[in-house]
Amino acid sequence: MSDIDKPLPRTDDPLTAPFWTATREHRLVVQRCADCSYLRWPPAPVCPECGSPSATWTPVSTAGTLWSYAEYHRAFSPAWVGDLPYTVGLIQLEDGPRMYGTMIGEPGSLRIDEETRPVFVDVTPTVTLVHWRMAERNPS
């Protein structure tokens, strides 16, 4: 049993299990349509581009940029009250898809269109969550 008091993803869901297996290894994978090669996230039973039900899981780069973010001051579930305020970012992965995730760092330090890096948080032996932080800036 987890000592975390928040809902955790079902890592045995056939649609998302390959993603959770990869995160445990501190890697990111997304679905690639077997017919048109469209990379998709979140996972879906059919490709939103061509309607094909065929897909494979493919590794993607962890490099990305912060596309947008929202700072939450009200919890929509009691499980997150202790985390207020918290920030959720929308990350544009270098390979194409966008992923949402909790941002690490103060909202004032977040910079739209600048590099991010994933932070793999091992929550339980079977659940590793992906959070994000801004990449270190190179001195000019």
Image (cartoon, grey):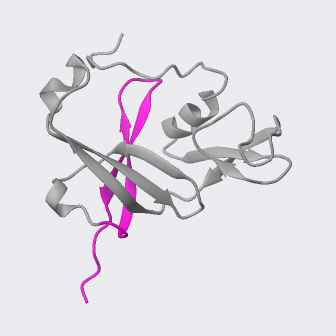
In this rendering, the answer to whether 19 lies above or below 112 is: above
Q: Position of residue 51 (x, y in %)?
A: 80, 40
Farthest residue to the right: give it.
35
Farthest residue to the top: give it.
1
Which of the 4 image quadrants contains residue 140? bottom left
Q: Position of residue 17 (x, y in %)?
A: 61, 27
Q: Position of residue 139 (x, y in %)?
A: 24, 84
139 lies left or right of 126: left
Q: Is residue 128 magenta?
A: yes
Q: Position of residue 135 (x, y in %)?
A: 32, 65
Which of the 4 image quadrants contains residue 5? top left
- Quarter of the picture holding the N terminus: top left
In this rendering, the answer to whether 137 lies above or below 124 is: below
124 lies left or right of 78: right
Q: Is residue 129 magenta?
A: yes
Front in this rendered view, residue 40 or 50: 50
Residue drawn at point x = 15 percent, y = 25 percent:
81
Front in this rendered view, residue 91 or 122: 91
51 lies left or right of 62: right
In this rendering, the answer to whether 94 lies above or below 27 is: below
Farthest residue to the bottom: give it.
140
Residue drawn at point x = 63 percent, y = 33 percent:
18
Front in this rendered view, residue 78 or 132: 78
Residue drawn at point x = 38 percent, y = 43 percent:
101
| Segment colored magenta | 112-140
Number of numbered discs: 0
Front in this rendered view, residue 20 or 40: 40
122 lies left or right of 57: left
